[in-house]
Image: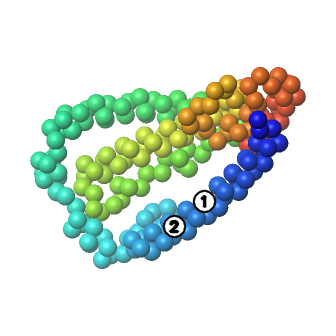
Amino acid sequence: MTSRTGLDEILERLKSVQHELEQEVDKVLDEKRQQFSYQLHRGRVIFKQNVRRWHRQQRTGLLRYLYSAPLAFILSAPVIYGMLVPLVFLDLAVTLYQHVCFRIYGVPRVRRNEYLYIDRHYLPYLNLIEKINCLYCGYGNGLIEYSREVIARTEQFWCPIKHARRTPDPHHRTAKFFDYGDADAWRENLEKVRKDWD
């Protein structure tokens, strides 16, 4: 059985590896920007003119796109896009929640724009339908990431206790939580964990 100290050491190594991974990802992104001839300027992607022209040539026309789409895909579109209503409601509810409650609790607010980064619709090789699809997916997945972080911070403040069983994909804040059944740590260190937002 691994001791708490052993887990702390593993978590420190994990942080170090995550930092290395982030640096490597940044390096790969820089290489991809060079490979695909684009740069970021004030948060916007700018392709070289000849690349934009080539991308537009690769775009599938709307009529051809619709004609080649399976009928089931077209008929399922209202079901897919109907999810926008609960997604927008979730967005409003989570944003309102954190602006009211986090101020009261002293919990740092989650910056929504760090999670909802929508940029794929700028790609010239996508037609209008593909761009709308990319807007939808970018918004939905970014919103879930944003919501997860808001809820994770709430859990860290109110109930930072690990579950008795391991869940398939625990959020990163779980590492700070108390072991299930460790009443002493809960009573002695709750305030410390509530303020550990790094």
User: Which of the 4 image quarters holds residue 155?
Assistant: top right
Q: Secondary structure at mark 2?
A: helix
Q: Is residue 82 visible?
A: yes
Residue at 61% x, 64% y is 23
- Residue 67 screen position, x and y as percent: 11, 47
Q: Is residue 117 above or below residue 24?
A: above
Q: Secondary structure at mark 1?
A: helix
Q: Nearer the viewer, residue 98 or 159?
A: 159
The amino acid beneath tag 2 is Val
Image label count: 2
Residue 22 — which label? 1
Determine crowd level at label 2: few under 14, some 14-19, many 20+ residues with C-alpha closer than 10 A: few
Query: Does label 1 or label 2 sit earlier along the sequence?
Result: 1
The amino acid beneath tag 1 is Glu
User: Which of the 4 image quarters holds residue 26?
Assistant: bottom right
Colour approach in the figure: rainbow
Q: Nearer the viewer, residue 183 or 40?
A: 183
Residue 28 — which label? 2
Q: Estimate the spatial distance between the alpha carbons at disc 1 and disc 2, rounded to whole Å.
A: 10 Å
Q: Is residue 102 visible?
A: no
- Residue 166 screen position, x and y as percent: 62, 31
Q: Nearer the viewer, residue 70 or 39?
A: 70
Residue at 45% x, 42% y is 141
